[in-house]
Structures are given as C-alpha cells and as structure tokens.
Image (spheres, rainbow, N blue to C red):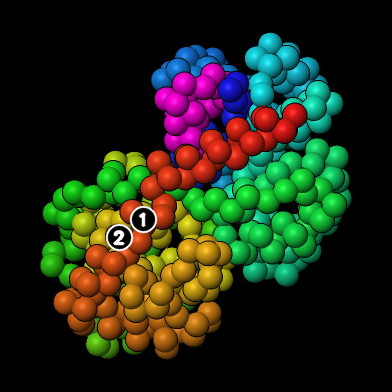
Amino acid sequence: MRIAVVNNFYPPRVGGSAHLSESLARGYAAAGHEVLVLTAAHLEAPSEHEADGMRIVRLPAFRMPETRLAVNFDIPFTARLSMPRRVRKLLDGFRPDVIHQHGQFFDLTWASGLWARKRGVPTLLSVHTRLQSPHRLYQLIFNVLDATLVAPFMRRCMPTYVVMDVQMREYIERKYAGGIAGMVPIPVGVDPEWVCGGDASIVRERHGLGADPVILSTGHVIPLRDRTALVEAMPEVLRAVPEAKLVVVGGIYFDAFLSRARELGVHESVVTTGAVPKCDIPHYLAAAAVESHELQGYGFGTASLESMAAGVPVVAAVREDNFLDIKLIDRHNVHLVPLGDREALAGRLIEVLGNPLDSAGLARAGAEFVTEHFTMDAVLDRHLRTLHELADSK
C-alpha cells in the first residue's frame, strides 16, 4: 500500500500524538509499505528528507499565539494560500491508497480530507484530543468551534475514526454525527521496553530528593490535567508520609496548582522539572513509588500506560471500561479512585507508599496488562488491518 500519514504534530515536536504517528509511520514502512508523512515545519528539522523508508515533508507553518485558550501549547498551523495547492500536488504525486490523519481540527487534516473525498481515497482519522475545557467560557468557545468549523469538515470528508477509549467514542458520536463513515476500536500504543531500566539516582541527585518517596506526575500541565487534585491531597499524604515529594514532570502551561500548593503550605514538597528529554523519563519512573495525573475524568493516556509498563503503580480517576473491551481492574492492575474525591486519592497514595509489597504485586500485574494489550506491535497490526480493509473498499 501507499500510505500518507498526516499530522501537524510530528517529532521533533513532543507529545503523545507526535510520537504515536511517528511510531506508526515507521511501522508501516518497516512492513514494506510506501509512506509519505505530511506535517508542519519545525526549526530543528529539515523541510524535506527521507528516513527509515519514509519521505517526510514539513510545510511552512506558524505557531498559534500563546493564550489560555491554547493552554500556551506549541500548536502549529500550516494555513496559507499556497498550502492546499501544495498538499494537492504532494498527494497527487504520491497517489496514496489510504490516508491516516491525526487530529480533527488541524488544517492539514482538512486539506488532505478534501483531497481524499474528491478522489475517492479512504481516510482513517485518529482523534487524539477532545475540544474540552473545565473553564465554562472556554468550553463554550470550543463548542462553537466544534460545531461551526470541525463538524462541517467531518460531514464533508466522512472519515473512519480510530476510537481509542470510551470517552472518545462518546465524544465523536455526540460532536460529529453525520460525519462518521465508521469507527474502529484501537487503543493507544506504547513501547514497554524504552521506559524500563532507568537509573533513579540520576533524578534523585538532580532534584535533591535523597531517599524521599516520590509521587510522580508525568505529562504537560494543562487545564484538563491541572494537578490541583494531587496538591490538595498532599496535606493528608504528608501527615502520613512526611518525607513524600510530588514530582511533576512536564511543561507547565497552566500553573494554578502551584498557587494552590502555596495556599496549603505544601509547596516545599512539590518539585517541578519543566519539559525533559524523552530519554530522561525512564529515570523518573525508576525513582517513583507511584504515578498519578489522570484525575479529571478525561481518559487514561500514553503516559499512564508507560508508567504501568515500567512497573510503577498508577492511581487514576477513570472508568473500568475506559478501553471498551479491555478492562482496568481496581486494586489488581491499577488503583481507581472516584472523580473529585480528594480523600480517596490521598488514601490510595498513602496505601501505595505504605505497602510496598502489595504495591509491587499490583505493579507487576499492570506491566503484564500493558504487554498483553498495548504494545506498538499489537496496535500497529490493528491499524494495518484497518488500512488494508479501507484500501480494499475503494
């Protein structure tokens, strides 16, 4: 097959969407398929090159201004008068059998979707981000953008959607009704091997942690994962485990949790690292007694699965059926707490820190859970089967 992979986010940009699209593109090429990657320009990367059997083209882009609406995140757009013509030329030259798009609200998705619709080429769309915010005004704006900009394109382009979890399925059914050619349940994929074998002493020395128990919280701090619940649980945690430290690893694009930590007098037990190189993540996981950041009911993402793969117990406020037919089991492979229950969160963190033997058993079960269901090989195979079916349906 000739497969075009389209994502405004692509390494060296960081993030789950970028890394997943790169891993899948590499997997498609390694399986013998021709692969063209279309993405947004990045200062650290050439505008066009070939790597690992893929042709990667980065179109000129601008970064969305830093605002609270954009959670101050690096969001690149390629929209300019020449972009649709450039996309048409690239795709006409490549003649893909199928297009795998990432992100429903990006201009490259729309441009490639319109090209595919006109030429009868099927599209598979992975929706990585729901347009949601805990801020009422921002949610109103997102609702308007979804209804007036995104949904009309979806109804016109009619992609088949990759459904990664139950929240995403419900979101797509609610927001893009009339623009759904089909839905395929495929969970997010991770590489269990790269997160293992870290050296805890590196980060303990770097941040002066000594032998303190570490509550790790990985991933960028944004309104949908604001870390406030963790900070509000810390007073009770510190009464039981005074030396505990909350280590937040990731870019801080929403800092309300730091103000709350000062209000509660726990700020000296909160360590922030900012964004760190991917190669450092195994070291932080090796130092962690527990990891927690999925506490606002928005799903269970890559970072949580990677923590489980590394043998770190995870505490999260998600549903047991988060992955549809793949079940999370409370106190077996993960710790599940009720949404918004700070006391329950603090209790589980204390339980993990105070019962290392029980925690080790849960951690092993969590690692086995990831290995069985979420390896990149398994996820890649499901994507390829879906792409073959779409290509054969033309």
**Residue at which label 1 appears:** 372
Image quarter (top left, top right, bottom left or bottom right) of the C terminus = top right
Inter-mark Cα distance, 1 to 2: 6 Å
Q: Secondary structure at mark 1?
A: helix
Mark 2: which secondary structure? helix
Q: Is residue 38 magenta?
A: yes
Q: Quadrant location of residue 69?
A: bottom right
Q: Nearer the viewer, residue 302 or 369?
A: 369
Which residue is painted at 54% across and 19% down in the image?
A: 34
Instruction: Say if mark 1 contacts mark 2, CB within 8 Å.
Output: yes
Query: Which range is magenta?
Result: 20-45
**Residue that protrudes farthest toward the top in the picture:** 93
Q: Is 79 located above or below residue 49 in the figure?
A: below
Count the numbered circles shown.
2
The x, y position of residue 114, in whole percent, is 80, 30
Q: Position of residue 170 (x, y in %)?
A: 69, 64
- The image position of residue 249, as x and y in percent, is 36, 56
Using residue 347 as the reference point, say whether residue 132 is left or right of it: right
Residue drawn at the location 33% of the way across and 75% of the way down: 332
Asked if 27 appears above or below 346 in the picture, the reply is: above
Q: Is residue 19 visible?
A: yes
The residue type indicated by label 1 comes to Glu
Which residue is labeled 2 in the image?
368
Picture coordinates of residue 277 (x, y %)?
A: 34, 41
| Residue in front for this viewpoint, 196 or 73 | 196
Q: Is residue 277 magenta?
A: no
